[in-house]
Image (tube, rainbow, N blue to C red):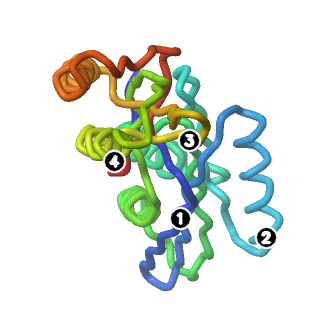
């Protein structure tokens, strides 16, 4: 199923009435990995008043914590940022340094949402889509022509071996695979025939 993935950690920050909110979004593939990432932030920011988090996995598992903030003002807004973004397999941690002035429920919701959105915006993200892995062999004289077509269809080349022929393994989006096969057949008069290997996932930057 298609969803948005976080490739690398994103960081954001929001301040209100001298309270500082540091937002972090990180990729994770399990509850235990999310717990480890949260623990790392707790250790690093041991002097913070609150360490709020939320995470969603691709299987639908979702968890959040207000970490002592009023119920519904912290973890739930962070989770809602993940849900609305379409991001899965990621955890957001928001670190709060208290500035001495109470923000009220509305202020807290606004602050935790803003810090989370800032982290999401600054993260490197990609869309996971269904692809097909192919292998193909071509004569050296046809190599450049094949590479041109692979680029035209945004193929992700996984492996290239220069043997008696050039052997290439690549992945392309499933929804354009029929058009790709047709293009290859027309270009090489059916002499070059890509061999389907398996379904695969593709990360397409967004």
Residue 202 as seen in the image, left or right of residue 62 = left
Q: Secondary structure at mark 3?
A: strand
Between marks 2 and 4 in the image, the one whose residue lies nearer the viewer: 4
Q: Is residue 43 above or below residue 157?
A: below
Q: Secondary structure at mark 4?
A: helix
Residue on which disc 1 sits:
23
Residue 81 as seen in the image, left or right of residue 20 = left
Residue 160: mark: 3
Viewer-side residue, 181 vs 35 = 181
Q: CA distance from mark 2 to mark 1?
A: 14 Å
User: Badge 3, how many Cα within 10 Å: few under 14, some, many 20+?
Assistant: some
Residue 67 rendering spot, x and y as whole percentages: 67, 51
Question: Of label 2 and label 1, which has the lower sequence position?
Answer: 1
The residue lying at 69 percent from left, 68 percent from top is 49
Q: CA distance from mark 4 to mark 3?
A: 13 Å
Question: Of label 3 and label 1, which has the lower sequence position?
Answer: 1
Question: Of label 4 and label 3, which has the lower sequence position?
Answer: 4
Between marks 2 and 3 in the image, the one whose residue lies nearer the viewer: 3
User: Badge 1, how many Cα within 10 Å: few under 14, some, many 20+?
Assistant: many
* Pointers 4 and 1 in contact (C-beta within 8 Å): no
Q: CA distance from mark 2 to mark 4?
A: 51 Å
Residue on which disc 4 sits:
144
């Amino acid at each position: 199923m298609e969803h948005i993935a976080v490739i690398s950690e994103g960081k954001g920050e929001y301040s209100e009435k001298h309270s500082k909110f540091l937002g972090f979004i990180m990729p994770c593939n399990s509850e235990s990995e999310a717990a480890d990432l949260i623990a790392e932030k707790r250790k690093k920011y041991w002097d913070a008043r609150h360490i709020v988090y939320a995470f969603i996995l691709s299987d639908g598992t979702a968890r959040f914590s207000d970490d002592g903030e009023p119920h519904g003002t912290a973890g739930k807004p962070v989770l809602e940022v993940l849900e609305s973004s379409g991001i899965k397999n990621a955890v957001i941690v928001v670190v709060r340094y208290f500035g001495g002035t109470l923000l009220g429920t509305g202020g807290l919701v606004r602050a935790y949402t803003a810090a989370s959105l800032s982290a999401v915006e600054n993260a490197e993200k990609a869309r996971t889509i269904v692809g097909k892995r192919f292998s193909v062999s071509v004569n050296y004289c046809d190599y450049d022509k094949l590479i041109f077509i692979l680029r035209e269809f945004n193929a992700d080349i996984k492996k290239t071996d220069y043997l008696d022929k050039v052997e290439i393994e690549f992945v392309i989006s499933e929804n354009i695979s029929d058009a790709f096969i047709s293009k290859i057949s027309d270009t090489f008069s059916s002499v070059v025939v890509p061999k389907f290997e398996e379904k695969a996932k593709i990360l397409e930057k967004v």
